[in-house]
Image: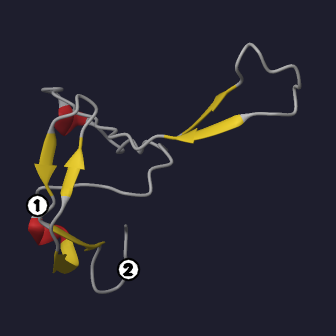
Amino acid sequence: LKAWHLSDDESSDDEVTEQVANLCFMALSDDEDSENEVEPWYVDSGCSKHMTGDKSLFIDLKVDGGKVTFGDNNKAKICGIGSIGNKFSTLI
């Protein structure tokens, strides 16, 4: 996500300050009729980093430390970094 800001005291329209924000986008469906859905929905969020709690989805997983910060400033431990998919194609 990119955010742009132009302060009130700047007279030139050509000067723009760029700020980059690291945000977590999360979606949850609690629809009880989900078995009746014909096609899945895909959100084009522009995210380049994704998270899952299911280690079985990874085709490769490197144990890695560090912390991730959520929108409410809570932090969680990063357990690993890898690729999701199968042996024929990488999804993420």
Left or right, 20 with respect to 18, comes to: left
Viewer-proximal residue, 30 or 23?
23
| Element at label 2 | loop
Instruction: State the residue position of label 2.
Output: 89
Nearer mark to the viewer, of 1 and 2: 1
36 above or below 42? Answer: above
Of all residues shown, which one is farthest toward the front? 9
Classify residue 24 by image quadrant. top left
Marks 1,2: beta carbons within 8 A: no
Classify residue 49 by image quadrant. bottom left
In the image, what residue type sits under mark 1? Asp
89 above or below 84? Answer: below
Q: Please tell me the numbered disc located at residue 54.
A: 1
Q: Position of residue 63 (x, y in %)?
A: 13, 76
Viewer-proximal residue, 40 or 1?
1
Q: Position of residue 7 (x, y in %)?
A: 70, 19
In the image, what residue type sits under mark 2? Ser
Of the numbered discs 1 and 2, the one sitting upstream in the chain is: 1
The residue at 26%/74% (across/down) is: 82
Viewer-proximal residue, 68 or 9?
9
7 above or below 51? Answer: above
Q: Position of residue 22 (x, y in %)?
A: 40, 44
The quadrant of the image that shows the C terminus is bottom left
| Element at label 1 | loop
Left or right, 32 with respect to 84, comes to: left
